[in-house]
Image (cartoon, rainbow, N blue to C red):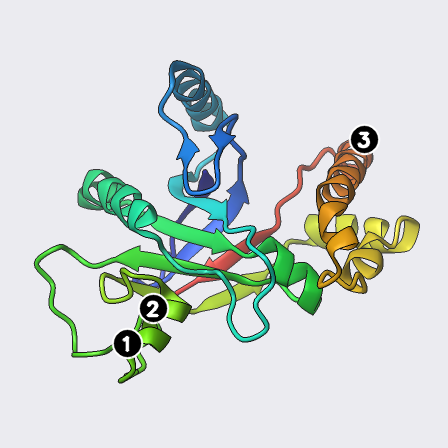
């Protein structure tokens, strides 16, 4: 889940300030996020954040870790994603909390040395857009190309532009990681098109996660602050 808020001045902009992984089980085409363990975890996390943070849960994220495609990323909404996002929007939007979906393509991000992810929202079921208009607002006449890039539900959702921002604390953490561990250079230069390196991806991500936790502890002892990196999309 993602933590954030609508922008205070720009009504069409959503600000994401933090993200929290859930203890869910993933399969090739779906994840299980509705069992008692996950629900109780979400409730406890929500209560903790309500007491310590001003932001609210305002979106969810997941990855499409498919083989690297040289032409397109795998950042799109599947039929299951579409149903999930529409359910959240119907529940949260009426209460002034516009709900956001983010899809990450981790393998392409690694291969291209650049973050590959998309931010999306879903149209109401009764909405009828322009013929052949894809989520990025372009008109694509060939059906196979629309489906290849945006999935079978290409006309039921739209893509939001993304802008990054970073707090001073986050910059300090990135500086520590860059100087002491050089993890970004290592991951960014990995030729992920090779099978051996793709198979070692989870091992590398685990190592990075451990180093991030160490850096967060160092920051906590040094300034009493917590990591505050985020993303702005609109």
Q: CA distance from mark 3 to mark 1?
A: 55 Å
Q: Is residue 30 left or right of residue 230?
A: left
> Residue 234 falls in which quadrant of the image?
bottom left
* Screen quadrant of the N terminus: top left
Q: Residues within 10 Å of mark 1 (few under 14, many from 20)?
A: few
> In the image, residue 160 lies at what x, y percent?
38, 66
How far across and how far down the image is residue 74, in percent?
49, 61
> Disc 3 versus disc 2: distance between alpha carbons?
50 Å
Q: Which mark is residue 6?
A: none
Residue at image coords 62%, 62%: 108
Task: Tell me what residue is drawn at x 78 percent, y 52 percent.
Answer: 196
Provide the secondary structure element on which disc 2 rests.
helix
Alpha-carbon span between mark 2 and mark 1: 6 Å
Q: Secondary structure at mark 1?
A: helix
Q: Which residue is mark 3?
A: 221
Badges 2 and 1: C-beta atoms under 8 Å apart? Answer: yes
In primary-sequence order, the first of circles 3 and 2 is 2
Instruction: Judge left or right: residue 89 versus residue 195.
Output: left
Q: As drawn, which residue projects farthest toward the right? A: 180
Q: Residue at x 83, y 52 (%)?
A: 183
Residue linked to disc 1: 143
Residue topped by disc 2:
147
């Amino acid at each position: 889940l993602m933590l954030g808020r609508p922008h205070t001045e720009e009504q069409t902009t959503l600000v994401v300030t933090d993200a929290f992984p859930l203890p869910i089980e993933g399969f090739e085409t779906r994840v299980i996020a509705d069992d008692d363990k996950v629900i109780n975890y979400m409730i406890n996390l929500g209560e903790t954040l309500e007491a310590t943070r001003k932001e609210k849960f305002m979106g969810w994220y997941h990855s499409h870790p498919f083989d690297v495609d040289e032409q397109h990323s795998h950042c799109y909404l599947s039929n299951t994603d579409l149903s999930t996002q529409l359910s959240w929007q119907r529940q949260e939007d009426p209460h002034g909390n516009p709900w956001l979906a983010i899809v990450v393509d981790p393998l392409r991000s690694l291969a291209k040395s650049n973050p590959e992810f998309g931010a999306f929202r879903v149209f109401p079921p009764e909405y009828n857009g322009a013929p052949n208009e894809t989520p990025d607002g372009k008109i694509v006449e060939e059906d196979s190309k629309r489906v290849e890039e945006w999935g079978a539900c290409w006309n039921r959702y739209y893509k939001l532009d993304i802008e990054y921002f970073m707090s001073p604390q986050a910059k300090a953490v990135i500086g520590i990681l860059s100087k002491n561990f050089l993890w970004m250079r290592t991951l960014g230069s990995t030729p992920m098109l090779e099978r051996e390196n793709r198979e070692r991806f989870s091992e590398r991500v685990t190592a990075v996660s451990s180093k991030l936790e160490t850096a967060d502890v160092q920051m906590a002892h040094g300034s009493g602050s917590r990591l505050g990196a985020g993303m702005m999309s609109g």
